[in-house]
Amino acid sequence: MEKLLIVEDKPEICSQLRWGLANLYEVYFAGNRLEALSCFKKHAPGVVTLDLGLPPDEDGATEGFRCLEEILQKAPLTKVIMITGSNEHTHALKAVQRGAYDYYCKPVDISKLKVMLERAFHLAALERENVRQLNATEGGNHTPGGIIGQSPGMLEVFSSIRKVAASDAAVLITGESGTGKELVARAVHGLSSRRTGAFVAINCGAIPENLIEAELFGYEKGAFSGAHNRVQGKVEYAHKGTLFLDEIGELPLNLQVKLLRFLQEKNLQRVGGREDISVDARIIAATNRNIIKEAEAGLFREDLYYRISVVNISLPPLRERGNDVMLLANLFLKRFAAENRKKVRGFSPDAIKMLESYEWPGNVRELENKVQRAVIMSDLPVIEPEALDFSFRSTAKDKLLTFSKLTLRDAREMIEREMIISAIENQKSNMAKAAEALGISRPTLYDLTKKHRIEKHVDYGSA
C-alpha cells in the first residue's frame, strides 16, 4: 500500500481525511513542521498533503513554505499537494513555483482530492521507475543499449534485441522517424559477439546518389576525377563488426543490386577496381517506409528485402507507448538540468497533461528537443506548459486527437488557456485590448491569467 503523509493541524480535517483515505493508503499524520519532517524521514511517503498555515504561523505561510522546501531537499521526487484556504491563491501559486506538485483549496472534497492523489501517486511511481531504470542502465545491466521503456511494445522490442543479438542474422528495423532505430541497431551490436568490432553507420538518404556507391564500397586511385588515392568504403570499415544502413529505402536501385551481391557472396569491388575483397560484416538496416509496398511498386528489390529482413524489429511510435512518455520526459529533464546547471525538479500538473495527451509526430526525438528547450528557457523549479512550446501551436488534427484523451473539463480549460495566451500575444501584452478581443473585462482577464498560471506572458504595465 502506498504511503501518504498528511500535514494538518486541524483535528476535524484530519478525521475527515482519515475516514476517506485510510482504506486506500497507509496514512500518517503530523500537526506541525517538525513532526512532519520526522515522520517523513521515518516513513518516506511518496506523496504529502501539506497545509500552508502550520503552527506557530497558522495565519501565514512561513512554516508551510519551510516544510515544503525541507521535504524537497530530502527527496526532490516527492509529490507535495498544498492545502490552502480559498483566499490564499497567491501563496499556493508560489508553492507550485517552488516545486509543489499541485494545490487544493479548502473545504476539502474527498472525491476530488482522491483523483488528485491518484495522479500524484501514479506520477511518483513513474519517476521511481525512471530512476531505477536509469541507475540500472548506468550499471550496464538493464535494457539493451540503455534504451528506456516499460510499455508492452518496448518490452517486446527488448526481447527481440536480446534474441537476435546472439546470431549473425540480418536485421531490418522499422518505425517512424524519431523512434530510436539507430539506438536499437547499436544495442544489437553491443550485445553481439561482434561488439569489439566497429559499428559503422551510414544514412542512405543523406548522401547524393552519385557519391553513395563510393561511400559504401570505396574506390581505387584514378577511378574518377579527384580520386587521387585508394579509399576504403564503409562496408570495409565494418569488417568483423556491424554495418548499419539507415533509411535503406532511399538506396538507388542500381546500388541495391550491388548490395544484394555483397550480401550473397560477402565480397565487394571498389569503384574502379576489379579485385574481389572479402568482408565479414553484419548488416542491420532501418527504414521509416513500408518496404513491402515499395517492393510491390517496383521501387525496392524484393530479393534484397528478404535478404535484409531475416529478423524484423518494429518500433512503436511514442504515442502508443503510454507511461513511457513521462518516463522519458523525466530522464531527459534530469540530464538537461545537470548539463545546464538548472535546479529544475519536474513538471507541473498542466505540463504533465500536455505531455501525456500530445500525439508526438516527431516521437522520442521531438520529446527530447522539447524538454531540452523547456529546461533552458524555464526560470522556475517546475516546467510549465508554455516552456514546452506546443500548447497553442499544434495543428487542428493534433488538437482533436489531444482533446479526445481529456475530460470535457480539461479540454475546456485547455482551450480557454490557449485563447488567453493567443489574445495577449496578438495584442502585444496590451491587457485592455486583449480583454476586448476576448469579450471579457480586464479584471476577469487578470483573474484568468492567474488561474492558468500564465502571468509570465503578461506585461502588467500595459494599458
Image (cartoon, rainbow, N blue to C red):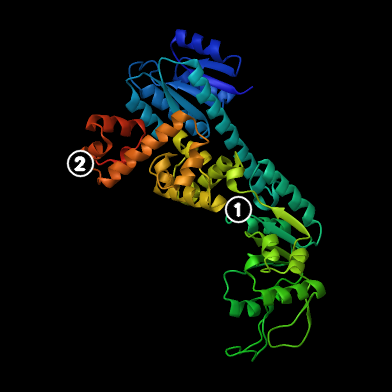
Image quarter where the N terminus lies is: top right
Residue 420 coordinates in the image, percent (x, y): 32, 38
| Residue at far left of view | 463
Amino acid type at image mark 2: Ser
Q: Is residue 64 left or right of residue 197?
A: left
Residue 15 locus on image (x, y percent): 50, 9
Query: Residue at position x 25%, y 32% from top?
Result: 440
- What amino acid type is highlighted by mark number 1? Thr
Q: Residues within 10 Å of mark 2 (few under 14, many from 20)?
A: few
Task: Measure the alpha-carbon separation of dots 1 and 2.
Answer: 45 Å
At 33% from the left and 41% from the top, the residue drawn is 421
Is 89 on the left or on the right of 126, as rendered? left
Relative to 230, say whether 79 is above or below: above
Q: Residue 78 placed where, x, y %?
A: 52, 30
Q: Look at the image and tell me whether residue 282 can be seen.
A: no
Question: Which residue does the image show at 72% across and 88% down from the upper left?
Answer: 273
N-terminal of the pair, mark 1 or mark 2, is: 1
Q: Which image quarter: residue 85?
A: top left
Q: Position of residue 280 (x, y in %)?
A: 79, 71
Residue under label 1, please give it.
179
* Mark 1 Cα-neighbour bin, 10 Å: few <14, some 14–19, many ≥20: many
Q: Secondary structure at mark 2?
A: loop
Which of the numbered marks, if any, corresponds to residue 62?
none
Q: Which residue is mark 2?
A: 462
* Camera-side residue of 423 and 138: 423
The quadrant the C terminus occupies is top left
